[in-house]
Image (cartoon, helix red, strand yellow):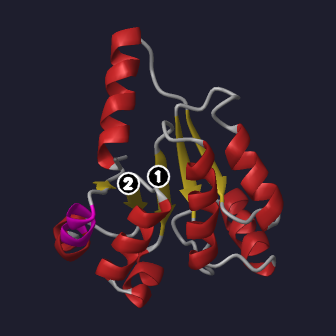
Amino acid sequence: MSRERIEARFAALKAEGRSAFVAYVMAGDPDPATSREIVKGLPAAGADLIELGFPFSDPVAEGPPIQKAAQRALAAGMTLRGVFELAADFRRGDQDTPLILMGYLNLIVSMGFSAFARAAAEAGIDGVIVVDCPPEEADPLADALDAAGLALIFLAT
């Protein structure tokens, strides 16, 4: 389903005449088990979409709260594979809420664009925000995500 889940959610929100509540959680913070329960509880708490951060050791585009969350998650053993496992666990219980990964390009490049896109799609991810990937350099990542049916979402300030 992937990208279509995002489109369907925004269409429903538009029909309801309301904005989306997008919740952000750092995967693995404060530990993988607690993080998993937090993510699972977000739809019932009103989240329309969930952004699931994948921890990175040098989150330079983030403020202190997200930097500290990433450090706690890494210290608790969270990995990119662990993020995919968390997402897959969430998806087994929720087929409707869009799930967006948010993180940094280094980990994606390390894994390989196609391998990352396939793993994300298999885990039930719908889209990806890569905070340090400028649009003019995004074609290889965009192509891999597109082939897997995932959305590449850019942030604008």
| Relative image position of residue 45 (x, y in whole percent) | 70, 28
Which residue is label 1 attached to?
100
Chain part drawn in magenta: 142-148
Q: Could you tell whether 7 is left or right of 85 in the image?
A: left
Disc 2 to disc 1, C-alpha distance: 5 Å
Q: Secondary structure at mark 1?
A: strand
Q: Could you tell whether 58 is left or right of 1 in the image?
A: right
Which residue is label 2 attached to?
127
Q: Across the whole image, how many numbered discs are drawn on residues? A: 2
Q: Amino acid at mark 2?
A: Gly
Residue 17 occupies which quadrant of the picture?
Answer: top left
Q: Earlier in the sequence, mark 2 or mark 1?
A: 1
Q: Secondary structure at mark 2?
A: strand
Measured along the vertical axis of the image, is residue 22 above or below residue 143? above
Residue located 39% across and 59% down the image: 128
For residue 141: magenta?
A: no
| Relative image position of residue 60 (x, y in whole percent) | 54, 72
Q: Are the residues at dot 2 and dot 1 in contact (C-beta closer than 8 Å)?
A: yes
Residue located 30% across and 41% down the image: 4
